[in-house]
Image: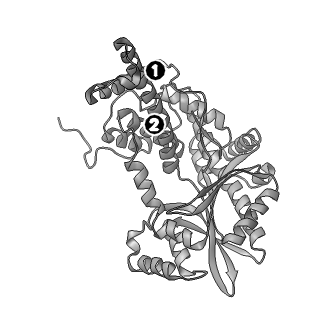
Amino acid sequence: MIRIDSYLHRTVLSGLVRRWMHHEVDAADAGLIARLINFNHLYVSRYLHLFTEGIFRELYPDGVTQRPALRKGDLKDALVNRAPYRNARIDELIRDYRSRPERYYRDTPFHGMLFFAQGEGIETCIGSSRIKRARRLAEKTARRIIDRIFVNIKKHAEELAEERARRLGISRDQLVTPLEEMQEEFLKAERRLLEDLQQGRPFAEDEDVVISDVAGIKMILEAPQQEQLIALLNRFPDCRIVEQEFHNGRYNATNLIVCFSPDRERILSRPVGGRILTLMQARGSDPEQVQQAFADFVRTGEPSVSLEIIVSNYEETLESEIGRCIHEDRIIRQRLTQQYRGHLSKNIEYLMEFLFAFPMSAQRELTELPIKLWNRYLPDYFDEVLKNLFDIPTNGLLDEIPC
């Protein structure tokens, strides 16, 4: 169903997603999903650091510094504080940003690193790296599944129309269908898919929908340096470019998907610590067990992973952060223009959000999923699902239900 190519054991995760969509839960799923999400988050953060640091040091041999960023405002400020060159458009963008910074989604969570290079005594931002947050990954996963399901429903609705045309003895293109009848055919096709889900029958093609951008890098490079980067990636150890896409128009950039084979033993050279260790201990594992489990997870996983690299010059980078094609505006448009927005669509969103949220909780058991794709829920219900997951009281200030 969904293959996250930035992760290890991605086939196992894909199978789990498919099972959960049919409401099929194994006794071992609580521990399995905790390892798949938490260990992969740690693995991605480590190989992304190794890869990004290596690439920037090759491009900037005089030295690179890096600083963590928790909000998009950190990145936007870094871009406008030290412009490597100026022109009328850049001056306009920086002036608008400084006059009304609150309009630019500065508080958007951004868990990543900013990279800087020294030039003529001035420190300039040369790029950033980030791991896609769990909520954004859940949203993207849901959207890809919904798109696939929408195609299947439309296909079956068209088959119903073909059947009706045959009964009338006419060709499909001669069939004139009132809007109400078209809607009924779509709903009938939707009901059939819901029945397939409920009965555990296959409902989609075997080919997985691929997500390759959990680990992401943005590089600010002018034209000569962009050519240098491609040459560097082609000779970089254990790395190859598998996809190259050029974006032209409102936003001009090059999007690269890179296949990378990290040094596993180097990644395992540091023990598991911090939040991941705390989460796994809350699930009943002692520190030594966590270290061994992570080592086994890495050594038995796939040899390579995918990263996304977006390359643009300084002016185009400004356009994507504070200009005509702000990234956050694009996210909002994606949410508003989704074609299929019925109950099934919303339930898939709920299920994927629960899938990525559960490993962040201290819950050790999962006997039944709180979402069945064929049921109908209000958002209030899922709000309580998440509160229960993290032991947040759901009854406000009331300690007792009045008699």
Q: Is residue 388 left or right of residue 233?
A: left
Which element carries disc 2, helix, strand or loop?
Answer: helix
Which element carries disc 1, helix, strand or loop?
Answer: helix
Q: Is residue 236 above or below residue 10?
A: below
Crowdedness near tag 1: few (<14), some (14–19) or many (≥20) residues, C-alpha within 10 Å:
some
Q: Position of residue 250 (x, y in %)?
A: 49, 63
Q: Is residue 114 above or below residue 240?
A: below
Q: Is residue 64 above or below residue 301?
A: below
In the displayed orientation, state which residue is furthest to the left: 403
N-terminal of the pair, mark 2 or mark 1, is: 1
Q: Which mark is residue 196?
A: 1
Task: Find disc 2 in the rendering and name its residue.
Answer: 351
Inspect the image, locate mark 1, and give the three-letter code of the amino acid beneath it.
Asp
Q: Is residue 79 above or below residue 329?
A: below
Q: Count the labels in the image.
A: 2
Q: Residue at x 41, y 43 (%)?
A: 386
Q: Position of residue 73 (x, y in %)?
A: 48, 70
Q: Residue at x 44, y 45 (%)?
A: 390
Crowdedness near tag 2: few (<14), some (14–19) or many (≥20) residues, C-alpha within 10 Å:
many
Q: Position of residue 9 (x, y in %)?
A: 67, 38
Q: Is residue 276 left or right of residue 196?
A: right
Q: Nearer the viewer, residue 271 or 91?
A: 91
**Disc 2 + disc 1, Cβ < 8 Å:** no
Can residue 348 be seen in this snapshot?
Answer: yes
Inspect the image, locate mark 2, and give the three-letter code of the amino acid beneath it.
Leu
Q: Is residue 341 left or right of residue 27?
A: left
Of circles 2 and 1, the one toward us is: 1
Q: Which mark is residue 325?
A: none
Q: Nearer the viewer, residue 56 or 311?
A: 311
Q: Position of residue 293 (x, y in %)?
A: 70, 41
Can residue 362 be seen in this snapshot?
Answer: no
